[in-house]
Image (cartoon, helix red, strand yellow):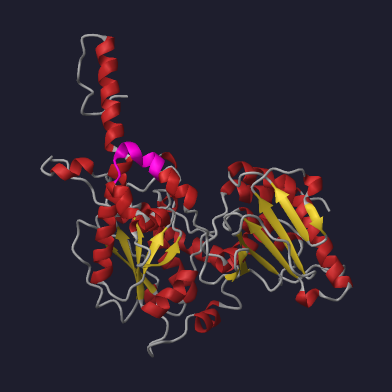
Amino acid sequence: MPDEATADLIFASDQANHNFARVLGDLRRAHLSITHRLRSISRDAAFVADVAAQYPGFPVVANERCGSWYVEPTQKGGSAYFKSTDGHTGQWKFSLRRLNVHLLSLLNDKGGCILVDSTRRGKRMPDALSKTVPIWCCVLNQALFMDDKDAHDLYTPPGVVSASEHSQMLARVPGFVEGLLGLGVFSPDPMTWRQKNLPDHDGKGSKPLRPVWVTPDMPWPDIDGLRDRYNVVLCCTSSRVPQTDGDSEAEGDYIQGAADDTENWAHGLTPELFWNNCQQLLDTPEADLPAFIESIVATGTTYVTSPTSTTSPGTFTEIAITPYLSAGQWCGPSPQPPDSSNVCHVAFVRQTTDAPTWARSPAYLEVGLGKQDKIAGRTLRYALPQICEFVAAFLKKAVQEKTVPSAKIRVLCQSGRDISVATALALLCFCFDEAGEPRTADSPPAVFNKDVIRVRLARIMTAMPHANPSRATLQSVNSFLMDYRG
C-alpha cells in the first residue's frame, strides 16, 4: 500500500509501478540494516550513560525485553518487566503476573532508579513508561501506604497523556489495588510487610513511589525537591524521534527503537553478546555481519543467572520458591541426576524423547519435549500429568519414610525462565497445599481454579522476577489443572 509521500505518483505502466515499489522496498530494507540498527543502539546507549552520570547513585534498570540493549553491562543494576500493552489506551492494566515487587527494595536502598526503555514509530515515549509504570507506582502506593492519602495520586507525563485518559486510568486503580491485595503477596498485611521488607534507612521511613520522565529531546528533570518525599522512578526513553527536515545527514542512518523485533534481524544476537563484541560488530561490513553474528552466537552462549541463585559449578542454577521447591536452569552440556535420594530432579532436555523413557530413577525425571520454544510450551500440557504424578509419588514416599523436612524438588530447563517456571507452578498447585507444605492424606482436597493458579504464580514471580513463562506455557498449566480429574 502506498504511503503519503508516494500516494499521488502516477506511472506510465504497471511495470514501472512495480519497479518503483521494488526499489522503494530495497531502500527501506537498506535503512533497516543490521549495521544501522547496531549503530543506532550504540548512540542511544550513549544517551543512557549521560543520564546515569547526571543522576549518580541511581542504579540503571533495563525494562525487558529490549532495555538491556541500551545499557552497558557494567552499568546495569537490574531488570524489570513493564509491558507497553498494559498501557495502551482503553486497555490499561496492572499486571498480576508481572508484579516487579523486587524493585521496591532497590528503590528503598538507593532512593530511586533509572528505568530504561525505548520506542519506535515516532512516539516520544513507550506506553510502558508513560502509562504502565505510573499505574504501577499508584497501585503500590495505595496498597502499601494506605495511611498516606497524599501519596495516592496518579502521575503521568504532561503532553503525552491527556487529561481525559489520565482520569480514566485513575478510575481503574481501586480495582487494581483490590486485585493486588487479593494475591496475598503483602501478607499478613501491607503495613507489616512494608516495615519488614522496606526498612527505615534515613530516619524518615520507607517512601512512596513517584515516576519522573526523561527523553533525548527534553531538559533534565529536577528531582532534588522530590527525593525527601519519594523514591523516584526516573523513566528514561533512550531513543529519540528522528528529524524529518533533512538537515542532519546522520538522521538517514538512525532507527528509532532499533532493538525492537530482534527475532526479525538479530540472528540470535543478545544484548550480552552485543556488548561483549560491540566494537567488532560496529566495524564489520554489513555483508559480513550475519556470518559474524552467527559465529559469536555459536561460541558465546550466555546462560541466565540471578544474584539470588545458588550455583553448583557446571551443573545448574536454582532459586527457591518454597523450602521444598525450586526452579532454575541446567548449565552444563546435559542435566545431571540428583546427588541425594532426598532430592528429586525434573529436567527438560533439548531432545524429543518418548514419555516411557523419562523416568531414569525414582528421583530423576528427564523430560524430552524438544527445542524449548512455543511448541514445547504447548506440548507441556501433555507431559504435566506424568510429571506431577512422579513428584507426588516421590513426596508420598518421603512422608512414609518421615524424610519430608529434607525433601526437595528441583525443576530445571535450558533457559531457567519458561518451562521450568511453569512446571513449578503446576507442582505448587498439584503437590502442595496453600501453606506450601506437601499434601498428605489428611490435606483438604485440592481445588484448582484461576484464582488459586494466579496466587501461586504471584508467589513464584515474586521469588523469581527474572522468570518469563510464555502465554502458551501458562495456558498448558491452566489446561492441565482445570481439566484434571483425580
Give the percent coordinates (x, y) of residue 56.
Answer: 28, 75
Q: Quadrant of the N terminus?
A: top left
**Image vertical order of residue 137 relative to residue 402, above or below:** above
Depth check: give the residue in front, 11 or 363.
363
Q: Is residue 437 above or below residue 450?
A: below
Q: Tell me which residue sits at (43%, 49%) in the image.
A: 296
Residue with the most extreme left position:
247
User: In the rendered view, does 486 fall on the left or right side of 107?
Assistant: right
User: Residue 482: in sight, yes or no?
Assistant: no
Please indicate whether residue 84 sits to the left or right of residue 44 in the image. Answer: right
> Residue 460 or 442: which is nearer the viewer?
460
Q: Position of residue 58 (x, y in %)?
A: 33, 73
> Horizontally, is 159 left or right of 93 in the view?
left
Of all residues shown, which one is farthest toward the top?
Answer: 13
Q: Is residue 368 left or right of residue 219?
A: right
Q: Position of residue 180 (x, y in %)?
A: 54, 65
Up-down: is 10 above or below 72?
above
Please tell me how many numbered marks the rendered image carries. Answer: 0
Is residue 54 among what the camera can see? yes
Q: Nearer the viewer, residue 279 or 210?
A: 279
The answer to which quarter of the image holds residue 160 is bottom left
The residues colored magenta run 284-292
Q: Which residue in the rendered view is the most extreme toward the bottom?
A: 203
Magenta highlight on residue 215: no
Q: Could you tell me what secondary structure mostly forms the magenta stretch?
A: helix
